[in-house]
Amino acid sequence: MKRIYLDYNATTPVHPFSIREMRKYEEKYFGNPSSGHWFGIKTKEGVEKAREKVASLLGCSPEEIIFTSGGTESNNYVILGTARTFRKKGNHIITTAIEHPAVLNPCRYLEKNGYEVTYLPVDKYGLVSPEDVEKAVKPSTILITVMHANNETGTIEPITEISGIARKRNILFHTDAAQSVGKIPTRVNKLGVDFLSIAGHKLYAPKGVGALFMRKGIKIEPLMFGAGHERGLRPGTENVIEIAALGKSCEILEKTMRENSERIKKLRDRLYEGLIHAGLKIKLNGSPEKRLPNTLNVSFTGVDSHELLKRIPHIAVSAGSACHSGSKTPSPVLTAMGASCEEALGAVRFSLGMRTKEEEIDFTVKDIKNVIQRERPARRRL
């Protein structure tokens, strides 16, 4: 049976052009970027070209891009680095209840070490209120960190409004944009952020590479110490092969993002409408409008999503977030949005991408309909 991949928010396939770019640095330009001879110079040029491509997608200066191992490292770098650097100024951080564990867990670590963290609630659509952010600000607040788009529901947060509050209060502002970069515009000046995190494997680059935008003029303490790589901010010989691939993916997405997003959104809506027309009882999780064009999270009434996934093993989707795959505890994101335990346990996240085809959407609808309707007469709870 044909296998269908609808889990692009978990990870994306590496783009063929990015694979081709990787091979150049595996086979020909293999030198150490810190070496002064030809082999090192050519490799260093590759790293800097990739930096320019990432910066171009974000609308910033190349010198404001720091290459990391991924979104988790970028998030930790900002949260822990800011906490250490500005400890004398204050010890208060503001975030939301629906952040990725790569934000929540560093915040929880800081709480155990004398810091105060405010976890703001969200509404039924998963949106945080800018007014709540402003009310939470204290004289001791040193950082606000709010994700750009949620990995489970795709809800897009009001980043521009929040950044205005942070700027007015002279507070640093970070957004985890792992899910939004390459899908919707993420121009840092328009968003008004001081830091922005990127995960390469969410935008058709390999796993194990990412980037951090850090606005020029900001200085925070590094988490690691070594040689002077990445302007002394992130030591260790650069992951040249994957950095080159990340740059190529950013270059491709800058050119194709609008066209891709429009096509994928139509397929996402076709999937949602197809499930409704199939007579399945579903509830949309997340904002109907302020949502990533590729993401659909729905709860199937009376269905256990993990059991459903077992019966459609040829269709790759997630029961809530891929980071919680295999767990039958209700999604903290959905419960924070007010979903009941049953609704949360019946949630399935479909996330589409470049390779998704119309016939795959139609097959998915048909297969899910057949599985659910076949099981219900036998009174089994999926």
Image (cartoon, helix red, strand yellow):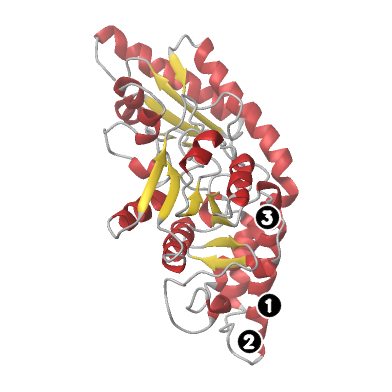
Residue for badge 3? 58
Badge number at residue 45? 1
Proximity of marks 1 and 3: CB atoms separated by less than 8 Å: no
Q: Earlier in the sequence, mark 1 or mark 3?
A: 1
Question: In the rendered image of this protein, does residue 128 appear above or below residue 174?
Answer: above
Give the side of residue 61 with respect to residue 306, left or right.
right
Give the side of residue 289 with respect to residue 115, left or right.
right
Q: Earlier in the sequence, mark 2 or mark 3?
A: 2
Mark 2: amino acid: Phe
Say which of 208 and 147 sits in front.
Answer: 147
The quadrant of the image that shows the N terminus is: top left
State the image coordinates of residue 145 (x, y, percent, origin top left).
Answer: 49, 49
Q: Give neighbour class at mark 1: few <14, some 14-19, many 20+ (Cα, 10 Å).
A: few
Badge number at residue 39? 2
Question: In the rendered image of this protein, does residue 14 appear above or below residue 292?
Answer: below
**In the image, what residue occupies the spot 47% across and 27% down?**
123
